[in-house]
Image (cartoon, grey):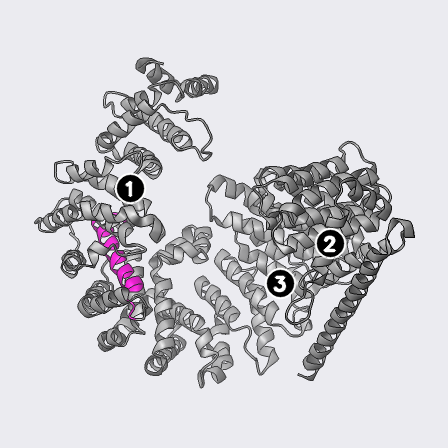
Amino acid sequence: MDLPSLVVVLQAALNPNPAERKAAEQSLNQFQYTPQHLVRLLQIIVDNNCDMAVRQVASIHFKNFIAKNWAPLDPNEQQKILQSDKDMVRDHILVFVTQVPPLLRVQLGECLKTIIHADYPEQWPRLLDWVKHNLQDQQVYGALFVLRILARKYEFKSEEERTPVHRIVEETFPHLLNIFNRLVQIDKPALEVADLIKLICKIFWSSIYLEIPKQLLDPNLFNAWMMLFLNVLERPVPLEGQPVDPELRKSWGWWKVKKWTVHILNRLYTRFGDLKLRNPENRAFAQMFQKNYAGKILECHLNLLGVIRVGGYLPDRVTNLILQYLGSSISKNSMYTLLQPQIDVLLFEIVFPLMCFNDNDQKLWEEDPHEYVRKGYDIIEDLYSPRTASMDFVCELVRKRGKENLQKFIQFIVEIFKRYDEAPVEYKPYRQKDGALLAVGALCDKLKQTEPYKSELEHMLMQHVFPEFRSPVGHLRAKAAWVAGQYARINFSDQNNFRQALHSVVSGLRDPELPVRVDSVFALRSFVEACRDLNEIRPILPQLLDGKWYSKMMATWSIHSNFFPAEIFKLMNEVENEDLVFTLETIVDKFGEEMAPFALGLCQNLAAAFWRCMNTSEADDEADDPGALAAVGCLRAISTILESVSRLPQLFVQIEPTLLPIMRRMLTTDGQEVFEEVLEIVSYMTFFSPTISLEMWSLWPLMIEALADWAIDFFPNILVPLDNYISRGTAHFLTCKEPDYQQSLWNMISSVMADKNLEDNDIEPAPKLIEVVFQNCRGQVDHWVEPYLRITLDRLRRTEKSRLKCLLVQVIANSVYYNAVLTLSILNKLCVTTEVFNLWFHLLQQVKKSGLLANFKREHDKKVCCLGLTSLLALPGEQFPGEALERVFKATLDLLVAYKGQITGLSLSLSIYIYVYVSV
């Protein structure tokens, strides 16, 4: 396809008509492997005369094709891009990446990343020369852009893989230093200067992330870099040109430069500035860094934080990083000496105000409470949050320097409580009270262990925390619930106080404000866990019942239960958070079979919540999104419910239709992220149901297919339900031919056992499954004995690990137990009888220094061997010579003695444990 035709097809790919758009996409796919196709796409991307939308489509197609085909994962896969096309792309993309607008540069940058990661240095040895040449020319931005990608390739590499970094640093860092030096000397620099400095910072960051290159360990060279970083750190950010919009402002170039500078200095300090490092060279660097730079950086950081004190602006991430640096300095005597004179100002005028509820919180609370909740419980948000960093700083301060700081900080909090209590309603410092409660909750571990605070906690909760459950201010009601949860496990001298807190938390589940409801349900979990007498909870939980459903269920069931956590499911409909599910799990776990009347409803609600979470997760397409985590939590909660009602098999019949769609879908590739949890549910359903239904049998092929395709790591998990199918549905396993379960099991086991690429550990479930067949199908699978023995013997000959050897020998033992005459005839036919029994007896005779058997360690192993050996004793004398009979007798007696000793020892250990436990 020539260039004009390609432009026409790309334009058609933007057509609102689905048919024309689909035809264009098919045409692109048809011609994507033709020579020069990539080169033509690149020409369109950089053509300023071409429509921007077409250029963007071309860039996306270009990026996706390179990501998929430049370096196929399978090394044996045929290359789909001509070498001449690759050469041309490499030569031109370096120049074009700086000529295109930022929107297209992002796509080309991703392409460069793919190419560099695959080709440098072997297939692209001249890349570094190009970078070095352009660092000295007028193409500085392009060189820095490419060098950033190159350096990032090695950011997380191990020491052995980082060798190319040394040449990169040696060849380019002298030029970077010169450029950096020129840039910081520019008076009234433009925003483009910030972009260049930011790239230099990112290159430096990637180069020193895991290890400082030896060239930078030179004191003079390192000092030159540090002087520049300190210059950037100290220099005020230009006021002119700063965006007014907060989101744009924090992403503004000069604030990005400040952030990366602080980031680098933090990394040098926390990873390489520790005097406890063992390596002499690293320790010498740490001493030099502490002596020459750590204190100066601390001073700069305190100056930056001073802006907050007077109401100035500092991006959240910069504030967070600075507080991390200060927190790391607390334990170092020399640094704390510098910090100590300013600790009161820092603690009370900067750190504490950051802990208080603020205007941004209020706006988010009112305009988007769901986002408020998400941010409050998102670990990633904590990395950027000044509030989290402030909490961490206070906790570290009282942990490492508590003697001189804890009392005055608590006194400060008490004063806030006092001012709050004394002020009229319209003048109460609600936001400061919120910060004080946050501080009290954050310090719970310290306060619960330290007198005199430990003795006063209950009084403090009653006087300053629990009253806020009735506050007219929503965020204080939420904070009261959170703090109550933090202290739910203290020893209340008056159980009425525990009940009061529990009542308040439960009431919070119906608060009109979403964040209050969420904090309340999380606190409820702590109270349920802390409760020693469940009668404390039973009178309260009926408030949460869905009346109609409750009445219906109570009429149906004779088993009495007082509650159903309907409010939790209302919240799960609003918020996707795994902690919500944890609360439900805790309730189910605590009340066990009392959940029976509600098991079906619980599973239905959890299944509905699971599908919502999965749909959200697929839409978000994020690896760590809360929807995916909550989905896993839903499945775990379902397993907890199934376990709690395991003695009520009829319930499983009712629950099965609700769970079948989940099991069917998630046993395919769609369920790779939740495969283990789904297999656990399948295991419960196949073990505790009165019988295994045909619908449940329909899951067998899905598990076998997954195991053959991608799920070998889950073989131990798949073993459990397959065992249940064979042992509890033996008749169906033996008689059904559509599908043929016996044949599919053989196909899977023989494939796994014959696979030379699998380690011994990977195939251990295979012989266990053969054992299940022989033990449960005695006399009904004679035609499978020889095939299974053949693959067992083949694997036994090349097995190295004794554990797998024992499992394979146990297959033979089970076969003998299944039919001794048939097994011996097959072994004789294969001419391996003597070899097999010699190995078996050898494994039985091996002992440890302690005198215990080295092999067949479990009770089950010993029993299987005994069953096999005693089956030989029943053979007619002519089939088993006297000498062999003597060895079998001795081995059997030794096994029985060892087995008796094992169960006696277990009983003795259990008796001692019970005695000690009861005595305590």
> How far across and how far down the image is residue 410, in percent?
38, 79
| Image quadrant assignment for residue 111 | top left
Residue at left 15%, top 48%? 174
Mark 1 or mark 2: name the one nearer the start of the chain: 1
Residue at the spot of label 2:
838
Q: Is residue 546 left or right of residue 261?
A: right
Q: What stretch of residues is rendered in magenta?
A: 251-275
For mark 3, what is the residue? 586
Q: Nearer the viewer, residue 535 or 124?
A: 124
Q: Could you tell me if the residues under marks 1 and 2 are in contact, i.e. CB atoms within 8 Å?
A: no
What is the quadrant of the N terminus in the image? Answer: top left
Residue 855 versus residue 381: which sits nearer the camera?
A: 855
Q: Which mark is residue 504?
A: none
Q: Residue at point 74% right, 35% down?
A: 743
Q: Residue at x 13, y 59 (%)?
A: 220
Within 10 Å of disc 3 (Cα), the crowding (few <14, some 14-19, many 20+) is some
Q: Is residue 151 visible?
A: yes
Q: From mark 1 to mark 2, how far is it between C-alphas?
A: 61 Å
Within the image, what quadrant is residue 781 found in?
Answer: top right
Magenta span dominant secondary structure: helix
Please state, as top left, top right, bottom left or bottom right, where the C terminus lies in the image: bottom right
Residue where numbered disc 1 is placed: 149
Q: Mark 3 or mark 2, which is nearer the start of the sequence? A: 3
